[in-house]
Image: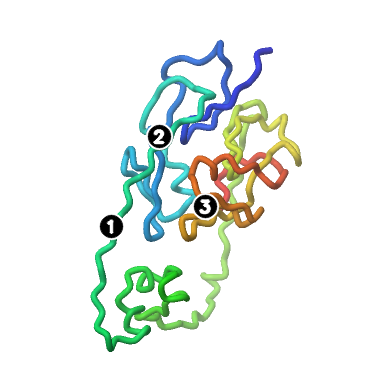
């Protein structure tokens, strides 16, 4: 049996063999992502998402052969932030109110802590009713135990069959992913790196069952 190889293209992570690697077998992203004010965006196809799990599920925009060579990721251009003019008599509170990161609720290294919501939403006490308490029955998904599926656990992405699935078949990150002050990492194993390609190669820290349904 031919050795299975892991594709190193960004957004692929599939396994393949040298004998079975046609020209259009790989769907990938041509260049790396960049992160700005809580938004994650692929610089090659301009598709974006605030949620990291949904961001990783954005399909690649290029096709080609699988490869074991790691791509060279060009750094995304730095996003210039407009200068904020403040008078000499302005206080730290007014600076927070005019800071774009503080206004959006993100941690700001310039002002030390997370900004308060300038327009807090009123809290409402919802009175439960028999209609609200009713729970819809869960619809069970029927899957052929020999049907190939792709594991959606974070950090896995392997193709598996339910007949071969067991409690240590999958190596994954229970998450969540953390992006802060130009560092990327996983909260579950407390490992953080600067480059995105290094982040994608952080080894999983947990064993469990493969799961074809997306993990929240």
Q: Earlier in the sequence, mark 1 or mark 3?
A: 1
Asked which secondary structure carries label 2, the reply is loop
- Distance from Cα at disc 1 to Cα at disc 2: 25 Å
Left or right for 82, reference 13: left
Where residue 107 sits: x, y (%)? 45, 69
Q: Which residue is mark 1?
A: 80
| Residue 18 position by quadrant | top right
Q: Residue furthest right?
A: 167
Where residue 155 sits: x, y (%)? 59, 42
Where residue 34 sits: x, y (%)? 39, 48
Q: Earlier in the sequence, mark 1 or mark 2?
A: 2
Left or right for 72, reference 175: left
- Pair 1/3: label in front: 1
Residue at the spot 46% in from the left edge and 74% down from the top edge: 114
Establish if 156 lies above or below 51. above
Establish if 96 lies above or below 5. below
Q: Which residue is mark 3?
A: 184
Q: Which residue is mark 2?
A: 29
Left or right for 194, reference 77: right
- Pair 3/2: label in front: 3
Asked which secondary structure carries label 3, the reply is strand
User: How many other residues sit within 10 Å of disc 1, few (<14), some (14-19) or many (≥20)?
Assistant: few
Residue at the spot 45% in from the left edge and 20% down from the top edge: 65
Q: Earlier in the sequence, mark 3 or mark 2?
A: 2
Residue at the spot 41% in from the left edge and 55% down from the top edge: 50
User: How many other residues sit within 10 Å of disc 3, few (<14), some (14-19) or many (≥20)?
Assistant: some
- Distance from Cα at disc 3 to Cα at disc 2: 19 Å
* Foreground residue among 166 and 170: 170
Residue at the spot 40% in from the left edge and 44% down from the top edge: 33
């Amino acid at each position: 049996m031919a050795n299975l190889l892991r594709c190193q293209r960004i957004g692929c992570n599939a396994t393949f063999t040298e004998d079975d690697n046609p020209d259009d077998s790989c769907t990938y992203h041509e260049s790396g992502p960049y992160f700005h004010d809580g938004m994650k965006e692929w610089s090659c196809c301009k598709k974006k998402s605030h949620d990291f799990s949904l961001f990783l599920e954005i399909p690649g925009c290029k096709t080609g052969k699988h490869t074991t060579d790691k791509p060279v990721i060009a750094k995304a251009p730095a996003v210039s932030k407009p200068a904020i003019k403040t008078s000499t008599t302005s206080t730290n509170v007014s600076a927070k109110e005019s800071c774009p990161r503080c206004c959006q609720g993100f941690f700001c290294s310039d002002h030390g802590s997370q900004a308060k919501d300038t327009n807090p939403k009123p809290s409402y006490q919802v009175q439960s009713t028999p209609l609200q308490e009713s729970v819809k029955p869960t619809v069970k998904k029927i899957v052929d135990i020999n049907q190939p599926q792709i594991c959606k656990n974070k950090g896995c992405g392997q193709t598996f069959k339910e007949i071969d699935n067991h409690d240590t078949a999958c190596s994954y990150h229970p998450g969540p992913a953390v992006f802060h002050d130009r560092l990327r990492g996983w909260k579950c194993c407390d490992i953080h790196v600067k480059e995105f390609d290094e982040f994608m190669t952080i080894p999983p820290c947990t064993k469990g069952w493969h799961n074809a349904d997306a993990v929240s």
